[in-house]
Image (spheres, helix red, strand yellow):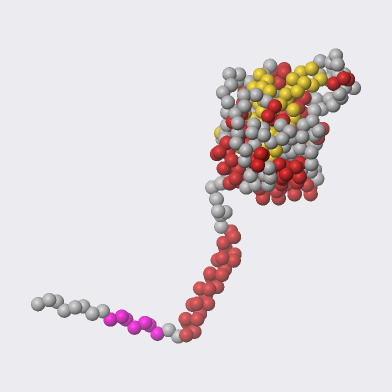
């Protein structure tokens, strides 16, 4: 005979008073609101494992080239590091860059690095003006795309800042090239990557849009004097200041220098050029680093020789970015 089917009877719910039920509901709702209103903001950010990109570098203490101060062991490895030199008056320029070719968020910077092998940061010194430093700290917290140097941000000290930049960059990044760029040029990072990735037989290389400038044997001689006034003067080849690159071997030699080992000229590009001459490096001239208009081969665009960068860069940067020739044109390989 088949077994009798089993029958289940639900237990009657325990009796609760309406006051107890409403009290429990009210307590649960209160805890829910408290958690989301007060505790939720204290949780870790969406990417808790992301390493901050902005960093303050005490270059004149840790990176002065003394034998007891070795570079940081955990150097971030990239093909090249690009330091965008900027200042306290260049807030608008930085915003224009972030609205064009320079990514405005850490994820964008990471994506650009993965696509090109280039790491980018703004490079700036310090000032005694507390309001300017406070504004900078807010910008650093918002965008996290700076290297802060422990050196006064003054136009007259640009050669010192440049040396500090290369020392800091070498300590923080393991790269094949270190690029100095200004914040008033329009850059194609993909084409800069292709240029730096080319095979080269000379380990000590200095890449830039080269020009000839005077050796400062005459203290009355000005770098901007017309050629007719410079006849009979000595010349040496050096790169225009808005953008140039030094190979790792060259930068390692700069890092090893004691402070004040080389003479500092009033102009940063002339100073670096004189050092490169003394170090007997290979000069690689590339006119695509000083293009006047966007073309299929241009790497850096600025208004040479009218301005040492883009004239009215905040406006001109945005105008160039609207042009298909600047943003969408395919790259044509150039051996120049």
Query: Residue 190: percent from the left, percent from the top?
Result: 60, 36
Which residue is at the far left? Answer: 1
Q: Examine the image and state in which quarter residue 157 appears.
A: top right
Name above or below for residue 15 compared with residue 233: below
Residue drawn at point x = 63 percent, y = 20 percent: 204
Query: Residue 3: percent from the left, percent from the top?
Result: 14, 76
Name above or below for residue 63 compared with residue 142: above
| Predominant secondary structure, magenta span | loop
Name above or below for residue 22 compared with residue 210: below
Query: Residue 295: percent from the left, percent from the top?
Result: 67, 34
Q: Which corner quadrant holds the N terminus?
A: bottom left
Residue drawn at point x = 53 percent, y = 73 percent: 29
Q: Residue 14 in magenta?
A: yes
Residue drawn at point x = 59 percent, y = 66 percent: 37
Which residue is at the far right? Answer: 220
Name above or below for residue 241 compared with residue 129: above
Q: Residue 161 in magenta?
A: no
Q: Is residue 302 toward the left or the right of residue 107 in the image?
A: right
**Front one among 73 and 167:** 167
Which residue is at the far top? Answer: 232
Query: Residue 200: percent from the left, percent from the top?
Result: 58, 21
Q: Is residue 299 toward the left or the right of residue 224 in the image?
A: left
Work out whether residue 252 can be spotted.
Answer: no
Q: Examine the image and state in which quarter residue 51 appears.
A: top right
Residue drawn at point x = 62 percent, y = 47 percent: 105
Q: Which corner quadrant holds the C terminus?
A: top right
**Front one among 155 and 206:** 206
Region of the chain picked out in magenta, as a range: 9-15
**Front one among 249 and 64:** 249
């Amino acid at each position: 005979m088949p077994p009798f089917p089993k029958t289940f009877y639900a237990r009657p719910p325990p009796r609760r008073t309406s006051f107890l039920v409403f009290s429990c509901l009210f307590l649960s709702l209160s805890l829910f609101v408290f958690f989301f209103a007060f505790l939720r903001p204290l949780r870790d950010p969406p990417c808790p494992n992301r390493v901050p990109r902005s960093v303050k570098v005490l270059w004149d203490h840790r990176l002065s080239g003394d034998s007891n101060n070795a570079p940081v062991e955990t150097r971030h490895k990239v093909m090249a590091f690009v330091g965008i030199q900027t200042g306290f008056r260049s807030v608008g320029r930085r915003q224009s860059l972030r609205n064009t070719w320079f990514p405005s968020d850490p994820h964008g910077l990471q994506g650009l690095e993965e696509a090109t092998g280039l790491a980018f940061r703004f490079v700036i010194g310090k000032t005694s003006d507390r309001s300017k430093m406070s504004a900078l700290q807010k910008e650093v917290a918002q965008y996290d795309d700076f290297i802060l140097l422990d050196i006064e941000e003054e136009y007259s000290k640009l050669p010192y800042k440049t040396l500090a930049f290369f020392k800091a960059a070498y300590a923080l990044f393991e790269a094949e090239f270190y690029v100095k760029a200004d914040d008033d040029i329009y850059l194609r990072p993909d084409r800069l990557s292709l240029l730096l990735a080319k095979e080269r037989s000379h380990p000590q290389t200095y890449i830039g849009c080269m020009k000839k400038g005077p050796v400062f044997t005459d203290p009355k001689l000005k770098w901007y004097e017309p050629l007719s006034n410079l006849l009979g003067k000595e010349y040496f080849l050096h790169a225009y200041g808005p953008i140039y690159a030094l190979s790792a071997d060259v930068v390692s030699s700069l890092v090893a220098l004691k402070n004040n080992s080389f003479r500092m000229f009033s102009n940063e590009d002339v100073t670096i050029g004189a050092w490169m001459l003394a170090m007997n490096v290979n000069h690689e001239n590339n006119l695509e680093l000083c293009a006047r208009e966007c073309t299929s081969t241009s790497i850096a665009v600025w208004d040479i020789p009218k301005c040492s960068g883009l004239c009215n860069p905040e406006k001109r940067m945005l105008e160039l970015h609207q042009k298909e020739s600047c943003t969408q044109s395919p790259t044509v390989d150039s051996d120049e």
